[in-house]
Image (tube, rainbow, N blue to C red):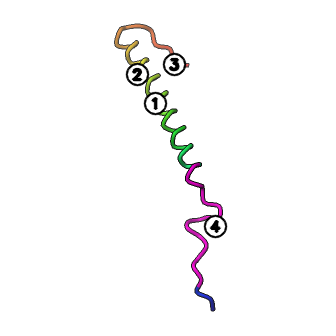
């Protein structure tokens, strides 16, 4: 019986684990989306506080 290290780090074989740069790019994109959605939401709140009509499309 062989006692070699198991080639799985999680549910997928070690060779299929995401590379560092892929995770980094995905993280940057996620942060950019969150910033854009936050700015949009804050602009709607400002409009609502001014008493302007807010349209959610």
Look at 62% across and 64% down and name the residue there: 12
Label 1's element? helix
Q: Is residue 21 above or below residue 52?
A: below
Residue at the disc numbered 1: 35
> In terms of sequence position, does the residue under pointer 2 or pointer 3 come before the other?
2
Q: CA distance from mark 1 to mark 3?
A: 18 Å
Q: CA distance from mark 4 to mark 3?
A: 44 Å
Q: Nearer the viewer, residue 52 or 37?
A: 37
Look at 55% across and 53% down and name the residue there: 20
Does 16 sit left or right of 54 as displayed? right
> Would residue 11 be counted in the magenta stretch?
yes
Residue at the disc numbered 4: 13
Residue at the disc numbered 3: 56
Q: Within 10 angstroms of label 3, few (less than 14), some, or many (20 or more) residues?
A: few
Q: Within 10 angstroms of label 4, few (less than 14), some, or many (20 or more) residues?
A: few
Label 4 or label 2, whichever lies nearer to me, is 4
Label 2 or label 3, whichever lies nearer to me, is 2
Part of the protein shown in magenta: 4-21
Does 43 sit left or right of 29 as displayed? left
Look at 46% across and 30% down and name the residue there: 35
> In terms of sequence position, does the residue under pointer 4 or pointer 1 come before the other?
4
Label 3's element? loop
Q: Quadrant of residue 5?
A: bottom right
Q: CA distance from mark 4 to mark 1?
A: 34 Å
Q: Within 10 angstroms of label 1, few (less than 14), some, or many (20 or more) residues?
A: few
Overall secondary structure of the magenta stretch?
loop
Q: Nearer the viewer, residue 8 or 57?
A: 8
Q: CA distance from mark 4 to mark 2?
A: 43 Å
Residue at the disc numbered 2: 42
């Amino acid at each position: 019986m062989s006692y070699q290290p198991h080639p799985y780090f999680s549910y997928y074989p070690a060779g299929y684990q995401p590379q560092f740069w892929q995770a980094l790019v995905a993280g940057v994109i996620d942060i950019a989306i969150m910033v854009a959605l936050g700015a949009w939401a804050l602009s709607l709140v400002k409009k609502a506080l001014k008493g302007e009509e807010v349209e959610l499309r």
